[in-house]
Image (spheres, grey):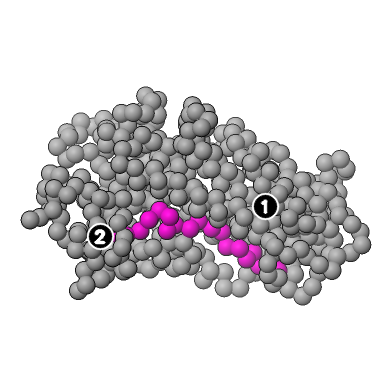
Amino acid sequence: MQRLKCLSNPDDRHGPCLTCTKVNRDSPKVIHKQICYRVKITDVAIFLPHDLGITDRKLLSTEDITHRTNEGPIEVQIMTRRLCSEPLTVRVQRFFNQSGDKINYWWTNDERGGAVDQTTLPPYALASLRETTGQLDEYMTKHAIKSWKEQIDRGDLHPVIADHFCFALRHYYQLDEEHKDRQLLHDLFTWRFALHHSMEPSWVYHRAGSSYKCLDKFKVKEEDHPLFHRIPTPRMVVAQMHSINCEMFIEPRSKALLRDLEKLYSKSVSKSFFTIYIVTFFVLYELGAMIEQQRTGRGRFSGMQREPARDAKYADYLRTMRANAETLLLHWQYYKRPPHKQIKDDGFYGDAVNKGFVYDISDDQSAFYRKTSFHLEKMHAEEAKVNPKAYGSSFYWVSRMFVADWVPEMNLTPSSAGKTQANETPSSSSGTNEDCEDEDDSIVVDVEGAMES
């Protein structure tokens, strides 16, 4: 993001680069105070673990399940909780399950002291992976914005989050159809839709048949069941659709979303401040939701309650998602930068916001941004006292967008985001300098006049 070439220090490759050490930080031309990091937004890889523990089979998104019965395909409707009022229609077919296939839904029964019970389900799989992939693509394209609107209409979101849903949608419709920012927002809507399709439990029904029976199963009667009064989607169908969704939709769309977001961040003159803010806010918000889902909601989605090495897998996932979130925050903090230190703080909310970034957005967007900064600064201070490690909290990451002196807790490198592990770093560390000879995007100052002679 900066305009100075990053030159590594041959005597200390894990320390600040030579470019950073030559900067006179007392110079009035220095507008960024962050220490030397070399990570890009495109180093971030947003993903959900592919393996749900439902089956040992591989290639679930590319190879159809064989050894089927002669009953023929059946058309069913699938509803995903809190996703959309419109169902997804797919065709399924019964198959002969093999060793390693867990076809029943396991759940925790609170009425029996937390005992793990199971709901028996018939062994059904998708009739055609290619057909379902096309149906899922069409479903997401058609209903992503509808789903976004329904999150607002449901009325159970925190007011701060609900306001962001409203402003994002309003901003989308105010932009011209050919505007690149509008396309980026649309990509955000469809990415979020795909993400939550693999985060919430689902059930099946026949649109034209009995509402009490589907695939030879009656509705669940246990009131403590996560899908009470529903018929859980067959487990192999869940595993296949999750694999398709992760490989064909969530991961490719997140890469495209982050690539286009990085382009906006890197522009020398920004005219997309509100778009950048909204997209960054929701990516951070969803990263928190993904962390919490893997911690507490994974079993409700997968129907698996006894996964081996579950705690270790979650710890690895948490480290990676933290690195992803901190990478985004690092770029946001660099981009928005605090006001000049000579600007007097008169106690008005929004004094911590650089006025130069909000001059070209609408008055209601500017007021909303300033008001949000005020509320989330307070929320961050309160949450830091109560639960400073609540990484899956709705506000843990987004509140840090407005912390003036925020610095990463982790040692961020291009390999620490994505699907590799990130390591904790001592507070005295100033980042990493590995393999940066050809990198031009270190996060340091962007004013050459600040260089020491």
**Residue 411 horizontal side relative to residue 194, left or right:** left
Q: Residue at x 69, y 56 (%)?
A: 241
* Residue 184: percent from left, percent from top: 49, 40
Q: Is residue 135 magenta?
A: no
Which amino acid type is marked by label 2? Cys
**Residue 250 horizontal side relative to residue 361, left or right:** right
- The range drawn in magenta is 37-55
* Residue 113: percent from left, percent from top: 66, 62
Q: Residue at x 86, y 55 (%)?
A: 73
What secondary structure is marked by label 2? loop
Cα separation between marks 2 and 1: 47 Å
* Residue 374: percent from left, percent from top: 33, 36
Which amino acid type is marked by label 1? Pro
List the residue tagged with mark 2. 6
Q: Residue furthest right?
A: 70
Other-residue count near label 2 (Cα within 10 Å), few / some / many at <14 / 14–19 / ≥20 = many
Name the foreground residue: 290 vs 22.
Answer: 22
Name the N-terminal-most of marks 2 and 1: 2
* In this view, the mark in front (2 or 1): 2
List the residue tagged with mark 1. 201
Can you see residue 315?
A: no
> Vertically, is 102 above or below 282?
below
Q: Residue at x 19, y 63 (%)?
A: 18
Q: Residue at x 20, y 34 (%)?
A: 345
Name the foreground residue: 389 vs 360.
Answer: 360
